[in-house]
Image (cartoon, helix red, strand yellow):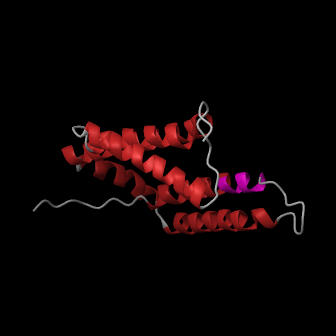
Amino acid sequence: MENKQTANYDFLIGLITIVLGIVYGIFAFNIRRSPIGNPFAPSMFPFMLAGFMVLMGVIVLLRSNPTELKQAFSISKSNRDADDIKGNKMISITVLSGIIYALMFEHFGYVISTIVFMMINLFVTEPEKRIRNLIVALIFSLVVYYVFFYMLGISLPMMPFVNW
């Protein structure tokens, strides 16, 4: 059995959590004020969530050791194998496709954006099953759109050239 050392990324996780909490708080501050009742009511929960994220990030940061982060990177680099490299590639493609999805969503609508997002991610996991991946992406996107739009009454961004 292979003996792998564990890596401690707590310092990095604390920093990322603080940054995300601050960015989320900025976006929460930009939420429209309510014209009726308490003008800050729509942004209260997002503000609390942002504050909680920053607080948790600070706690993790204070409990961590920055020198362990350097050791963690060297440990993970020395313990890499083919499966780790493949997993990292899949994670990178998933993150990139998520960014593409977010950029496409408003311009191309829910259905097209979701089909593209799912196709990319399904092809990463099972590239040899092209037809099945296409069918799954199409059916999933259309069924979820139908459920949200017609059954729940929640409008999603429509396709730019088809108004349905």
Q: Residue at position x 46%, y 52% from top? A: 143
Query: Is residue 162 in view?
Result: yes
Query: Relative to 60, is 123 on the left or the right?
Result: left
The image position of residue 18, as x and y in percent, is: 60, 58
Query: Relative to 81, is 60 on the left or the right?
Result: right
Quadrant for the N terminus, please: bottom left
Membership of 87 in magenta stretch: no
Query: Relative to 39, is 59 on the left or the right?
Result: left
The image position of residue 9, as x and y in percent, is: 42, 58
Query: Is residue 89 in view?
Result: no
The image position of residue 37, as x and y in percent, is: 89, 69
The outermost residue toward the left is: 1
Quadrant for the C terminus, please: top right
| Overall secondary structure of the magenta section | helix
Which contiguous range is marked in magenta? 24-30
The image position of residue 77, as x and y in percent, is: 28, 46
Q: Residue at position x 28%, y 38% from top? A: 131
**3 shown above or below 128:** below
